[in-house]
Amino acid sequence: MKILSAEFIKSATEPQHYPENTPFEVAFAGRSNVGKSSLINALVCRKSLAKTSNTPGRTQVVNFFLVNRRYTLVDLPGYGFARVPADVRRSWKPMVETYMRERQNLRLVVLIMDIRRDPGMHEIDLLQWLEHVRIEALLVLTKIDKLTKNRIALRVRLIMKMLTDKAGLKTIPDAILFSAKTGDGRDTLWNYIEAL
Ligand SMILES: Nc1nc2c(ncn2[C@@H]2O[C@H](COP(=O)(O)OP(=O)(O)OP(=O)(O)O)[C@@H](O)[C@H]2O)c(=O)[nH]1
Ligand SMILES: [Mg+2]
């Protein structure tokens, strides 16, 4: 995918502030610090279109980006990090759920997981909920640059088995391997989005 333009549209916390008439929307969800903002930057070949940070809880609002005037990429706040103040933490789940429930042109939710971490309650919850409300989901296992090829293969098998055993989903979403550091998986992810 050749990036001709990539721009920040706006941030919002509530539906009345979401941008209107945006094209084909893809949202990126996942645990805090997993690399959602970095993945968006890698997708659009920009270093800091989406703000990234070593401090978990960097993204605390819903951020909308427009790519090639054809795709809207949505950076969602991450969940589950203890160091963020409790009131901010409590506002995340409703913010993310409200966004997903209200957004008519939302076509895909990409659930990003660190390939080194086992899927937890949050991930399983989200996948079950997406299946229930019939929103298409895709898994991205990121930070693969941190592991050897053998370990990557092992982890993929383990994670997919855990999801099959624990989540009770009718269909397990596809999984794409990714690294924001090396750009691995970037083309595969764009191809997937374009195929939709
Ligand atoms: N090695 C490696 N580091 C990564 C990768 N993706 C993200 N990181 C690092 O992980 C940290 C968090 O990245 P962010 O993109 O800010 O994570 P986020 O999910 O947007 O975090 P929140 O906005 O706090 O929810 C940063 O230090 C990134 O440099 C990756 O693929 N490989
Ligand atoms: Mg972020």
Image (cartoon, rainbow, N blue to C red):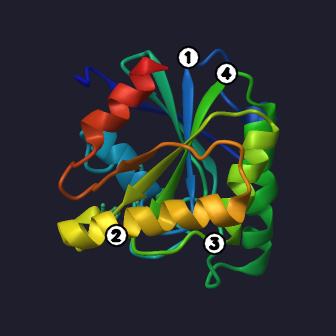
Helix, strand or loop at label 1? It is loop
Residue 152's spot in the image, x, y percent?
Answer: 29, 66
Rounded to the nearest whole Å, what is the CA distance between mark 1 and mark 3? 32 Å
Query: Position of 19 compared to 95: left or right?
Result: left
Look at the numbered disc 4 and give the secondary structure of its residue. loop
Instruction: Say which of 77 and 31 sits in front.
Output: 31
Residue type, numbered disc 1: Pro
Q: In the picture shown, does residue 169 fall above or below 81?
A: above
Question: Extreme bottom residue here?
Answer: 83
Foreground residue, 107 or 99? Answer: 107
Residue at mark 4: 105
User: With respect to residue 54, does 49 lie above or below?
Assistant: above
Instruction: Kindly report which numbered mark, 1 or 3, lies closer to the viewer in this rendering.
Output: 3
Residue holding disc 3: 120
Disc assigned to residue 23: 1
Instruction: Say which amino acid is labelled 2.
Output: Leu
The picture places residue 154, in percent across and down from the top left corner, at: 34, 70
